[in-house]
Amino acid sequence: MTISAAIMAGGKSRRMGRDKAWLDLGDGIPIVRRVVAVLAGVADEVFVVANDPAYDALGLRVVRDRYPDGGALGGIATAVAAAAGEVVLAAACDMPFLSAPVWQLIVRLAPDNDVVVPRVAGEFETLHAAYAKSCLPAMVSALTTRRLRVISFFPDVRVREVGEDELRMADPGLRSFTNVNTPEELEAARWLVAR
């Protein structure tokens, strides 16, 4: 089974007020480079889904979003269509504490499922999940009918939820699921790195 990893960088960073992917946590390493480093260790290829040419600086293939009005689902569908691998790990560009063991758990569950998605605090982590190529028709159908929530196509495919108990075996504090969307979250992440 070949694995692709797509860094989802199509958001507008409205709550942050500037592109959060390029912010660092006080050590000079942009968040997006942290994401690249972890994904490169678990996938056969890593690429970026983004419309901003700034991401060309990463030295990775940058795929323009085919569905710019499709939200996160459009970005994921773009990634699945563009990936060389049979399974695509979709990761948000603003998650500085991704964990290779969590991704390895998700990859181990992928062969028997179309979607492998963590569920933390009752919410699906759709931008920290694996999607098989077989999901693409259901994704495109959802986009065509303007059902833009990522989970809107889940009833049409085989979904494996990964609960907190399983996740904590790989990441006891569930830090992998930390997003940096606001200045306050950025400061909290910097505090974690500094201590």
Image (spheres, rainbow, N blue to C red):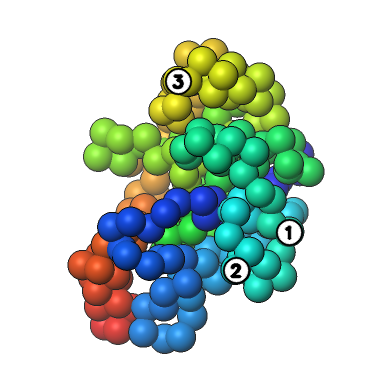
The residue beneath circle 2 is: 54
Q: Quadrant of the N terminus?
A: top right
**x and y percent of residue 109 in the render?**
57, 35
**x and y percent of residue 52 in the render?**
58, 60
Residue 126's label in the rendered image is: none
Mark-to-mark CA distance, 3 and 1: 28 Å
Q: Is residue 72 left or right of residue 111?
A: left
Q: Secondary structure at mark 3?
A: loop
The amino acid type, in three-letter code, at marker 1 is: Arg
The residue beneath circle 1 is: 61
The amino acid type, in three-letter code, at marker 2 is: Ala
Mark-to-mark CA distance, 3 and 2: 30 Å
Q: Is residue 186 above or below residue 27?
A: above
**x and y percent of residue 21 in the render?**
46, 66
**Quadrant housing residue 180:** bottom left
Which badge, 3 or 2, comes first in the chain's sequence? 2
Identify the residue shown where x is 25% and y is 68%: 183
Tell me whether circle 3 and circle 1 mark residues in contact (CB < 8 Å).
no
The residue beneath circle 3 is: 147
Tell me whether circle 2 and circle 1 mark residues in contact (CB < 8 Å).
no
Q: Secondary structure at mark 2?
A: helix
Identify the residue shown where x is 73% and y is 43%: 83
The amino acid type, in three-letter code, at marker 3 is: Arg
